[in-house]
C-alpha cells in the first residue's frame, strides 16, 4: 500500500515514552524519516534501535527542516507541535478504532488488536502499555488502526475514528477537569463525530471464557467484543480468540514466586481500579500491597477513597507520591492515604514507607507461604519487584 508519510521528517521529543515511541514506530513504517530525543533511555527504545535518538539531560534543538512533535512531559522545555497533533494525523490516515474511558483502556484496546491479529485482519495498533502477545505496544499492519485514546489532557477530542469505544466515565484527572460532568461533556462532544460508538457501561459483562481474571476484565471484554463485531469480526471468531488473551503488561502481571509467595504487579492508580484489582487478586491466602500514589492532585482529591479501597488488602505499605508531570502541593503526601486506611480500618497492618525499598522490606518481613504480594501504581513501583523477590528468597 502507499506510504502516507513518505518524504516527511519527524523529530520527537520524549521519544522514549510509551506513546511517543509507538507513534515513532508507526510513522516510520508509514514512510517518514524519524529521529528524536529523550532525557533517559527506556525499554520502549529497544523497538527503535535503528532510529537516531539522543539521550541527554537538556533537549537539543530540533534538526533544521524537521517537524518537531513534543511529548506532554516536555512542553515547557521544547517548542513544537503537540504529541496529540501527531496522533490525530495518524488516526486520520487509516480506518481506526479508538478506545477511551477512565478505566480499562489499555486492556480493551489490546483485546481488540489481539483478536484482529489472530483473525487475520493485519491491524496496526498504538497502545499505552506493553502487550506480550502482540510483541509490544505498537504494530504496523495494513488493516484497522487500534488506538488507546487519552482524556487526561482533552486530546481525545481531536481524534476522528470510524469506531469509538467508551469503556466508562469517571473523574480521574483533577488537574484537567473540575467535575465528572466536565468529563462526560468531553466524551459526549467527541462521540458526536464518530459513526459507530460502543458504550461499555451499557453492556452486560462478557459471559464467555476468559484467561484474564476479574469482573472488570469481563466488562473490558464486553466492550472489545462489541467493537470487533462492528469491525466485521464474527462473534464466533472473536470469542475463540478472546479466550486466549493473557493480558497487558502491569495488569495483574505475575512476576514470580518464592517459597509459595506470589508477586504480582498492577498499574491501578484510581480507587475504582484498586478495588477491582484486589477483588480479582483475592485467593485463599492474604493480600499484601505496596501502593505508590500517582499525582499530587489525584491524591489530594481522592486520599480517603484510595485508603478505603486499600482496606480490602491484609497489609499495606504506602510510598511517597510519584509526581509524573506535577509539582508538589503543600501538605499532600502519601501519608494522607495511610491515615485514611487507619481511620477506615483501625488495627490493620499499614505503614508509611516513603521509598518503595522500605515498603518492600516491610511487606517481605510479613509475608508467608500462600500470600500474594502486589505492587500497585502507575509510577515506578514495579521496580520494587526484583527487590521483593530477593527479600522473600
Image (tube, rainbow, N blue to C red):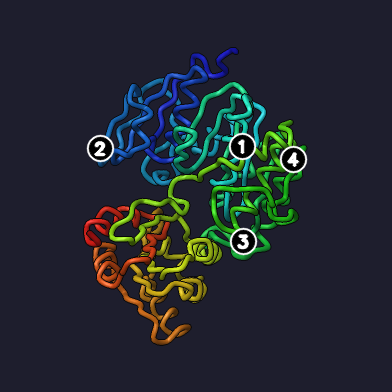
Residue topped by disc 1: 241
| Snapshot quadrant of residue 96 | top right
Q: Earlier in the sequence, mark 3 or mark 2?
A: 2
Q: Residue at x 69, y 37 (%)?
A: 228
Q: Earlier in the sequence, mark 2 or mark 4?
A: 2
Q: Earlier in the sequence, mark 2 or mark 1?
A: 2
Residue topped by disc 2: 56
Residue 170: mark: 3
Percent position (x, y) of residue 390? Answer: 22, 56
- Callout 3: helix, strand or loop? loop
Percent position (x, y) of residue 124? Answer: 56, 28
Please say if 72 is above or below 201: above
Q: Quadrant of the N terminus?
A: top right
The answer, for residue 309, to whether it is visible in the render is yes
C-alpha gap between disc 2 and disc 4: 41 Å
Residue topped by disc 4: 193
Q: Earlier in the sequence, mark 3 or mark 1?
A: 3
Q: Earlier in the sequence, mark 4 or mark 1?
A: 4
Percent position (x, y) of residue 300? Answer: 46, 71
Label 3 close to label 2 by CB (< 8 Å): no
Question: Are there few (<14), some (14-19), or many (20+) residues within 10 Å of tag 3?
Answer: some
Q: Quadrant of the C terminus?
A: bottom left
- Callout 2: helix, strand or loop? loop
Question: Are there few (<14), some (14-19), or many (20+) residues within 10 Å of tag 1?
Answer: some
Amino acid at each position: 500500500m502507499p506510504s502516507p508519510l513518505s518524504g516527511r521528517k519527524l523529530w520527537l521529543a520524549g521519544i522514549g515514552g510509551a506513546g511517543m515511541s509507538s507513534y515513532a514506530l508507526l510513522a516510520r513504517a508509514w514512510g517518514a524519516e524519524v529521529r528524536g530525543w529523550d532525557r533517559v533511555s527506556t525499554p520502549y527504545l529497544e523497538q527503535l534501535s535503528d532510529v537516531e535518538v539522543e539521550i541527554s539531560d537538556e533537549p537539543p534543538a530540533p534538526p533544521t527542516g524537521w517537524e518537531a512533535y513534543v511529548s506532554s512531559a516536555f512542553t515547557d522545555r521544547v517548542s513544537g507541535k503537540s504529541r496529540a497533533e501527531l496522533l490525530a494525523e495518524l488516526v486520520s490516515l487509516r480506518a481506526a478504532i479508538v478506545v477511551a474511558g477512565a478505566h480499562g483502556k489499555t486492556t480493551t484496546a489490546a483485546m481488540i488488536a489481539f483478536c484482529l491479529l489472530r483473525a487475520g485482519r493485519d491491524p496496526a495498533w498504538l497502545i499505552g502499555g506493553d502487550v506480550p502477545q502482540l510483541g509490544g505496544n505498537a504494530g504496523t499492519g495494513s488493516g484497522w488502526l487500534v488506538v488507546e485514546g487519552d482524556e487526561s489532557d482533552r486530546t481525545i477530542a481531536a481524534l476522528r475514528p470510524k469506531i469509538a469505544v467508551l469503556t466508562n466515565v469517571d473523574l480521574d484527572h483533577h488537574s484537567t477537569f473540575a467535575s465528572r460532568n466536565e468529563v462526560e461533556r468531553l466524551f459526549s462532544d467527541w462521540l458526536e463525530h464518530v459513526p459507530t460508538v460502543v458504550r461499555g457501561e451499557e453492556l452486560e459483562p462478557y459471559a464467555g471464557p476468559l484467561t484474564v481474571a476479574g469482573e472488570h476484565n469481563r466488562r473490558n471484554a464486553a466492550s472489545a467484543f462489541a467493537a470487533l463485531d462492528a469491525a466485521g469480526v464474527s462473534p464466533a471468531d472473536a470469542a475463540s480468540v478472546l479466550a486466549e488473551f493473557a493480558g497487558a503488561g502491569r495488569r495483574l502481571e505475575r512476576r514470580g514466586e518464592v517459597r509459595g509467595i506470589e508477586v504480582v504487579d498492577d498499574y491501578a492508580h484510581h480507587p475504582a481500579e484498586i478495588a477491582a484489582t484486589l477483588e480479582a487478586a483475592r485467593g485463599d491466602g492474604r493480600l499484601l500491597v505496596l501502593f505508590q500514589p500517582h499525582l499530587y492532585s489525584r491524591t489530594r482529591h481522592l486520599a480517603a477513597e484510595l485508603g478505603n479501597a486499600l482496606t480490602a488488602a491484609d497489609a499495606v505499605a504506602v510510598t511517597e507520591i510519584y509526581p509524573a508531570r506535577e509539582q508538589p502541593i503543600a501538605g499532600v503526601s502519601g501519608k494522607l492515604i495511610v491515615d485514611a486506611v487507619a481511620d477506615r480500618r483501625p488495627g490493620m497492618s499499614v505503614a508509611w514507607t516513603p521509598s518503595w525499598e522500605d515498603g518492600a522490606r516491610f511487606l517481605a518481613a510479613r509475608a508467608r507461604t500462600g500470600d500474594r504480594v502486589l505492587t500497585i501504581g502507575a509510577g515506578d513501583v514495579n521496580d520494587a519487584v526484583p527487590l521483593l523477590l530477593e527479600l522473600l528468597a
